[in-house]
Image: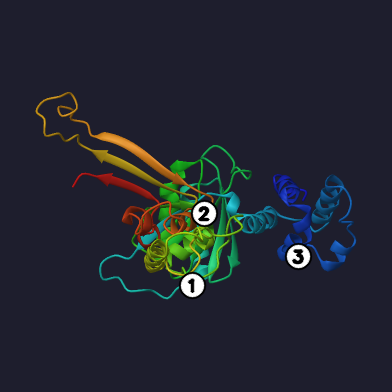
């Protein structure tokens, strides 16, 4: 990788790859031949291994786009290291669904960004389920693209949804939205109140694909499967009542959450704005024009599974509040609650 910053981008990416994944990611990249990979000692120290791999890339005259593709592949393997936002697009009134061409989408997307901003590099990699991963290194009118802090976009063709890694350059979001909207032949785009590190779960929520397996956290046994530990000497009438209530709770929980694993989200946030109300006349708070505000945030390594477990574990009454159970159906984990 002779030309900067291609060599440095490639070196940095290779350094990030865990040794246990090195061969898998390099084979997926498919830039180095099988014969070249066989000449490399993958059991040596990582610094030496990286140097050998960089030399091979230089022999093959790796370009910046080649290095960017390797970076995309690494990010696909480690997508949970990013925080992903969801954008939803829509057609205009009476607009028909057009035939979609992925190559035309890529060309249009890149042209729109290049026309508006000279210093930007865009790379694409096709993925499963008619998806394309896009890597964008943003620059400014006076600065070269920053290859070390790129943004990533995942777009599923012929759908109104795009997933973007949270970017520090918020000023580029309107341009990114414009490029996505025009290239995918939609009319407008909005950012949804939905965010997570788990891209597959976000996709399942917006596409209503709940009945699939999701990565779970490290709890050994789900709360709802743990024994409630009833005393064997307990009165039989109490045992019957507890059993009946337990069956009701399980039934209600299954009706709300289903019997499949939940999509994985780490938090739900609720902002409350309300005017102070009192039957008593006067008082400082009743005269206050500004509403009272508070923020409540529920966090868990696997929030929806945790919520699903509350009632069966006897921690909460069943059913839970709709504000907690509506998250997948509404496609939201940011809520604003105001007075009607």
Q: Residue at x 18, y 23 (%)?
A: 284
Question: Picture coordinates of residue 222 (x, y %)?
Answer: 54, 60
Element at label 2: loop
Mark 3, residue position? 27
Mark 1, residue position? 101
Cα–Cα gap, marks 2 and 1:
37 Å
Q: Is residue 52 above or below residue 239?
A: above
Query: Which tag is nearer the camera, tag 2 or tag 1?
Result: 2
Element at label 3: helix
Question: Picture coordinates of residue 123 (x, y %)?
Answer: 59, 57
Q: Is residue 250 above or below residue 150?
A: below
Mark 2, residue position? 302
Mark before the other along the chain sequence, 2 or 1? 1
Mark before the other along the chain sequence, 2 or 3? 3
Q: Is residue 235 above or below residue 85?
A: below
Mark 1 neighbour class, 10 Å CA radius: few under 14, some 14 to 19, many 20 or more = few
Q: Residue at x 41, y 57 (%)?
A: 311
Mark before the other along the chain sequence, 3 or 1? 3
């Amino acid at each position: 990788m002779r030309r900067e910053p291609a060599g440095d981008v490639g070196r940095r990416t290779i350094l990030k790859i865990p040794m246990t994944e090195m061969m898998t990611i390099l084979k997926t990249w498919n830039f180095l031949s099988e014969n070249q990979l066989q000449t490399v000692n993958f059991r040596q120290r990582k610094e030496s291994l990286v140097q050998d791999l960089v030399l091979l890339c230089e022999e093959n005259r790796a370009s910046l786009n080649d290095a960017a593709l390797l970076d995309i592949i690494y990010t696909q393997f480690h997508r949970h290291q990013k925080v992903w936002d969801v954008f939803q697009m829509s057609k205009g009134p009476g607009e028909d669904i057009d035939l979609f061409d992925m190559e035309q989408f890529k060309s249009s997307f890149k042209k729109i960004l290049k026309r508006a901003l000279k210093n930007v590099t865009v790379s694409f990699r096709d993925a499963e389920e008619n998806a394309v991963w896009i890597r964008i290194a943003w620059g400014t009118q006076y600065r070269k693209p920053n290859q070390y802090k790129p943004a990533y976009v995942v777009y599923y063709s012929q759908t109104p949804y795009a997933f973007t890694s949270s970017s520090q350059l918020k000023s580029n979001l309107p341009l990114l939205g414009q490029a996505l909207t025009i290239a995918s032949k939609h009319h407008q785009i909005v950012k949804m109140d939905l965010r997570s590190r788990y891209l597959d779960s976000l996709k399942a929520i917006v596409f209503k694909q709940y009945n699939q397996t999701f990565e779970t956290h490290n709890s050994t046994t789900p709360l709802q499967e743990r024994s409630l530990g009833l005393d064997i000497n307990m009165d039989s009438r109490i045992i019957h009542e507890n059993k009946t209530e337990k069956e009701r709770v399980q039934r209600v929980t299954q009706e709300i959450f289903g019997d499949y694993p939940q999509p994985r989200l780490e938090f739900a946030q609720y902002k409350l704005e309300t005017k102070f109300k009192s039957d008593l006349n006067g008082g400082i708070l009743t005269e206050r024009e500004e509403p009272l505000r508070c923020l409540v945030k529920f966090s868990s390594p696997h929030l929806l599974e945790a919520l699903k477990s509350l009632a069966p574990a006897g921690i909460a009454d069943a059913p839970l509040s709709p504000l907690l159970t509506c998250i997948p159906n509404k496609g939201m984990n940011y809520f604003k609650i105001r007075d009607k």
